[in-house]
Image (cartoon, rainbow, N blue to C red):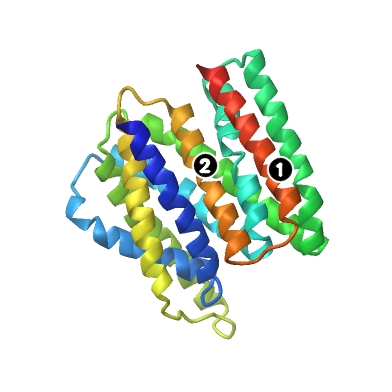
Amino acid sequence: MWLWMSVCSALLLGIYDVSKKQALKRNGVYWILVTATGLTALYLSPFLKAGPLADHLSLVLKAVLVSASWVSGLKAMECLPLTTVSTIKASRPMFVVIFSIILFGERLNLLQWLGVAVVMTALFLSSRSKHHETDKKTSAKGITFMIISVLSGSASALYDKHILQHLEPLFVQSWTNVYITILLAMVLLVQYLTDKEHFQPFVWDWRILLISVLITVSDSLYFFSVKDPDALLSVISLIRRSSVIITFLGGVLIFKEGHVRDKALDMLLMMAGITLLLFGSW
């Protein structure tokens, strides 16, 4: 069951990323995230339950990691084509492995190291296409944001496995969204107070409602799959990252982005490396 929940989660996550890119046409990064997350917190409010202070503090840390990943990821979408973002985002399972080595002292076998090498090669080759579509300054800025997003997202995935050993999925999801909403609202407040003249007002966009529904269902499926005692985090991470295929297709079909051939080869190489990591973990 956890395998199919992961597949459904990946499908919804891909559509979610495409919808976020479209929503950037009318609103800024923080408005999109705070509104969508606030709606998600509202959907999950029936599952809000009291708990020990230690549990809530652990979820505040979770909210910081997720906020960092979401904000930097959306900032990257402002600077880079969606096809480039999706290619880099596909590397996240590799960083989960690297974090596992650093944090838990895990060792890689030959097949896993080969997978890491292939992924790193794909990341390097992906630079060929991005420079054709954005200037160097914008490209470097977007890549920096994307690296922050991937690293913080990888840390969040590892942290999920830790906290879900003793916390219920809906407790984690409901309270995390509350804390994310509070954090992002505070950022918006600071922006308003420090620069009222250039503060961008919110414009309602129906896609924000779609974004909130997609991420709510996708995350619920993800948390329940991770909670399963038989679930393999490495497999779940790989399946969920396959959402970048949908994101990539969205960039090609909806946003009509160029240099598709080179990026498609980079994407295939990236997924091949991730597959090697998966088989090396079995």
* Quadrant placement of the N terminus: top left
Which residue is the site of mark 2? Answer: 242
> Residue 251: x percent and y percent?
61, 60
**Foreground: 167 or 260?**
260
Which residue is the site of mark 1? Answer: 266
Say above or below: 11 vs 40.
above
Query: Which amino acid, mark 1?
Result: Asp
C-alpha gap between disc 2 and disc 1: 14 Å
Name which residue lies at 38% across and 47% down.
60
> Left of 92 or right of it: where is 58?
left
Q: Which disc number belongs to residue 191?
A: none
Secondary structure type for disc 1: helix
Name which residue lies at 34% across and 64% down.
38
The residue carrying pointer 2 sits among few (fewer than 14), some (14 to 19) or many (20 or more) residues within 10 Å by Cα, namely many
> Left of 7 or right of it: where is 26?
right
N-terminal of the pair, mark 2 or mark 1, is 2
> Residue 21: x percent and y percent?
55, 65
**Foreground: 85 or 67?**
85
> Left of 205 or right of it: where is 104?
right
